Image (tube, rainbow, N blue to C red):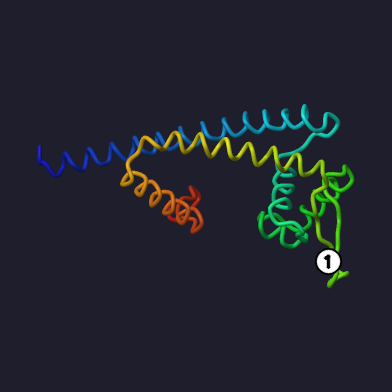
Amino acid sequence: MDKGVLEVDHNSALKHQVHELYTQFLHQQQLQEKLEGEAFLEEIRESVSEHYNFHLTEIHVLSCIGHTEPINLTAIAEKMGISKGNISKINSRLLKEGWIRKSQLNDNKKEIYFRLTPMGKKVFSMHEQYHDRAHQLFNRFISRYSTEQLEFMKQLLQDGITAIQEGQLLVTAPELK
């Protein structure tokens, strides 16, 4: 058999294996996110509020506010990529339960801004600690790779993000129909 044909066959098989591993990775990531999210929400219930059942989106809104307070509704919606209507509903619940408060700036009494209450700051702090732990675990995991391998991973992920944003990886793309 021709060497070129063998290389094509090997390359094709390797691409198939990479796709299978990528699919497994995504499934494992989804499962892990679900389990970790549930565990984190339970940790918040036990530590901060047994009577309020947070949704992860509410935690992320608190985090967004905590990172940039004071912040208005439009800025929260833009930073999170969620509609202003949904942010308004979430903020209404968070206000009602005492996790955030409204404020106004001295030079602009018309615009409403949001800040964390002491209870909201506790949840924000727990969320930050959670992400710090995740960052440490990830750094420990990738420390086995060389600088060159990390550069390749970085490029692969950047290319993947671009391809997703441009719709190149949509299974329902017109060229597949």
The count of marks equals 1
At 82% across and 41% down in the image, what residue appears? 119
Circle 1 residue: 105
At 41% across and 54% down in the image, what residue appears? 159
Helix, strand or loop status at disc 1: strand
Residue 141, quarter of the rendered image? top left
120 relative position to 67: left or right: right
Q: In this view, does 166 lie above or below 10?
A: below
Indicate the amino acid at tag 1. Answer: Leu
Where residue 20 sits in the image (x, y, percent)? 40, 34
At 64% across and 38% down in the image, what residue appears? 129
At 48% across and 53% down in the image, what residue appears? 161
Where residue 171 sits in the image (x, y, percent)? 48, 47
As drawn, which residue projects farthest toward the bottom?
A: 107
Q: Is residue 22 visible?
A: yes
8 relative position to 52: left or right: left
Q: In this view, does 116 lie above or below 104?
A: above
| Depth order, front residue of 85/154 | 154
170 relative position to 62: left or right: left
Q: How crowded is mark 1: few (under 14 residues within 10 Å), some or many (20 or more)?
A: few
Where residue 75 sits in the image (x, y, percent)? 72, 61
132 relative position to 148: left or right: right
Q: Is residue 177 visible?
A: no
Q: Quadrant of the N terminus?
A: top left
Residue 131, quarter of the rendered image? top right
| Depth order, front residue of 9/89 | 89
Where residue 162 sits in the image (x, y, percent)? 46, 56
